[in-house]
Amino acid sequence: MSTNSVSPAAFLVANQAKVVARLTDKYSTERKLEFDKLNEPVLWAKNVDDINLLVKMFMLDENIKVDFLSDLTAYDNEDGEDGDKRFVLVYQLYSLELHTRIRLKCLVGLTEQANTITDLFLGANWLEREVYDMYGITFKKHPNLRRILMDERFSGFPLRKEYPIKQRQPFNDNIRLHMGANPLQVNTHTPQEEK
């Protein structure tokens, strides 16, 4: 091994320091920058429109080079601990070249719409549908915003804090299902199919 080669750990530390310096110098003048327990940066967007701008800028910025959306989720901020709006959207961004992560957070009001980022990351399609399904946060210009985890007949949003933990919504027209040693025989044919 030559003396000029850099260890992978040193490479990652140098890249993370470069990303943090860039976030501090260019992006955190009007935005809150904090760090999580792993010392990875968390940047708070000013509003829902700022998210799209930041993601595009991170993709074009040679010092950050974001090119992958690891995750998109939300949490209920009903207690107001993180700000004055009801929800917080969380975007986990990653650079495959630099092996660095950036987390973007944004406050979203109860009736406020976020902007879709499906034009930037195709994987955001299902992630935004999941956020809609669990919290009721809608995304402007989403190509197919509908439930993805819950039944279409389900009413409410199960990860909101006011949703009762033990509430169930049985549907009378569900097919009976029995898993066990002696499975039930279920006739799935309808009279129309037999004609």
Image (cartoon, rainbow, N blue to C red):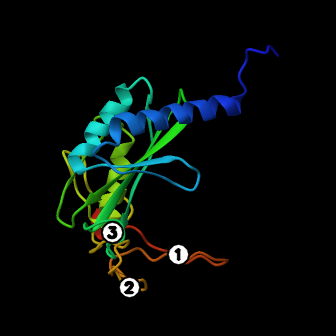
User: Is residue 23 found left or right of 141 in the rendered image?
Assistant: right
At mark 1, the secondary structure is: loop
Q: Is residue 194 visible?
A: no
At mark 3, the secondary structure is: loop
**How far apart are the two marked residues, 2 and 1, measured between alpha carbons?**
29 Å
* Three-letter residue code for mark 2: Gln
Q: Dot 2 corresponds to which residue?
A: 167
**How far apart are the two marked residues, 2 and 3, measured between alpha carbons?**
31 Å
Q: Is residue 108 visible?
A: yes
Residue at the (21%, 45%) spot, across then down: 49
Residue 34's place in the image compared with 53, above or below, is below
Image quarter in which the N terminus is found? top right
Q: Earlier in the sequence, mark 2 or mark 1?
A: 2
* Three-letter residue code for mark 3: Thr
Q: Dot 3 corresponds to which residue?
A: 190
Image quarter in which the C terminus is found? bottom left
Q: Which mark is residue 185?
A: 1
Q: Residue furthest right?
A: 1
Q: Which mark is residue 53?
A: none
**How far apart are the two marked residues, 3 and 1, measured between alpha carbons?**
15 Å
Looking at the picture, how far across and down is residue 144, in whole percent? 25, 48
Quarter of the view holding residue 156:
bottom left
At mark 2, the secondary structure is: loop
Residue at the (30%, 49%) spot, across then down: 45
Looking at the picture, how far across and down is residue 105, in whole percent? 36, 53
Q: Nearer the viewer, residue 10 or 124?
A: 10
Residue 168's place in the image compared with 57, above or below, is below
* Three-letter residue code for mark 1: Gln
Residue 54's place in the image compared with 46, above or below, is above
Q: Earlier in the sequence, mark 3 or mark 1?
A: 1
